[in-house]
Image: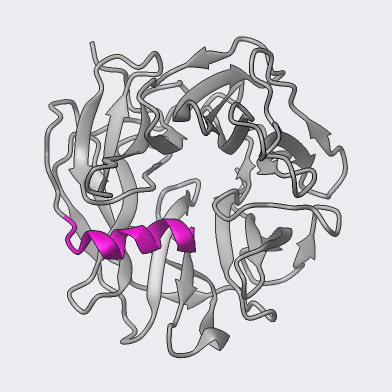
Amino acid sequence: MHKRIALVTAACLISAAALIASPAGAKPSSTNGQIAYDRTNFATGDQSVYTANPDGSHEQQLVANTCCPTWSHRGNKLAIPDLTDDGRIGTATVNADGSGYNPLPIDDPTLNVGCGGAWSPNDAQLACQGWDESNPARNGIYTLSSADGSNLTRLTTNPLGGYDEPGAYSPDSKRIVFLRTDPNDNGVGLFVIKTNGTDLHQITPPGTRIQGGNDGDWSPQGNNIVFSRHVTADVRGSLWVIHADGSGLHEINVQGLACGGSVFAPNGFGCHEPHWSPDGTKIIFAGNSPTTGVNIYTVNADGAGLFQVTHDGADDDPSWGTHPPVG
């Protein structure tokens, strides 16, 4: 997350471009609704957030000059990075139709708080990556109110001097899965911690290679966590599932894509940033190679039923929500 949202600083401005006309409210649901992702303009380096139906139709730009959208469970809002007036990275929420852009204030003068992934199951809280450029000892996960940024509370401390990147709350709201990195932004492993700050434990085997941004996503059913890893240093990412207690590690064989391809091959394919669909039957992820660029795909949880959502080679950071599809 830290590497991703640092790109927002270079954009210099966060602007809410309300370009969608659709209902802002939605009841809690496990229905597979709209998806969100970011797109890079390679000519300028700027990123913008888009929404679309799961089949790629009715694609619309939602917010310009930002990245890394994440749907709330209700499907009525998204969380996105926000550039504060003094140049730090914060978080904003925005309605599903692009209205109601709401920067969350940070009740701390030097802390960056990027909430790019983890809404609590009742959508009342966000778990965020926090870091202080002047004091790495403050790096860790922080939680806050998704309504107004209040109740800023530290949850973790990274003893390595790297970052803790929150992935998702468990469906019962009692635990959070996250990626811990070292000072060089190398992923050390996925960890789980209770939301009261106790029972911290690593769930991936030592030496598991995990790229930043692949922070783990908890299945709606409660026990499976999906993530991307590089099995060896010379291959790209592939999709894996592990239980919350560290057992059951296995690869998802994405039928139709050779995830985990060679980093030296022009057509070597990688799969990363996986997230569950709201009903837990499918996975959305980004797939990339030097020849294809980065596009958004969906697949059944068992690896069958592959579908390519976008085709322009510039899309990343997908999220699947419950907001009803357009049309």
Residue visible at 73% across and 39% down in the picture: 223
Q: Is residue 94 above or below residue 60?
A: below
In the rendered structure, the answer to whether residue 39 lies left or right of residue 140 reads left
Nearer to me, 177 or 209:
209
In the rendered structure, the answer to whether residue 150 lies left or right of residue 257 reads left
Give the image location of residue 140, x and y in percent. Answer: 56, 74
Q: Is residue 4 magenta?
A: yes
Give the image location of residue 320, x and y in percent. Answer: 44, 31
Give the image location of residue 235, x and y in percent. Answer: 72, 40
Q: Is residue 272 magenta?
A: no
Nearer to me, 217 or 286:
286
Give the image location of residue 25, x and y in percent. Answer: 24, 33
In the rendered structure, the answer to whether residue 194 lies left or right of residue 95 reads right
Helix, strand or loop for the magenta stretch, by majority: helix
In this orientation, does residue 78 appear?
yes
Q: Name the quarter where the C terminus is drawn.
A: top left
In the rendered structure, the answer to whether residue 305 lies left or right of residue 231 reads left
Q: Quadrant of residue 152?
A: bottom left
- What are the residue bounds of the magenta stretch? 1-14
Q: Quadrant of residue 304?
A: top right
In this orientation, does residue 125 appear?
no
Q: Is residue 70 above or below residue 204?
A: above
**Total labels drawn:** 0
Residue visible at 65% across and 13% down in the picture: 256
Residue visible at 33% across and 72% down in the picture: 150
Q: Is residue 300 above or below residue 102?
A: above
Residue visible at 64% across and 35% down in the picture: 219
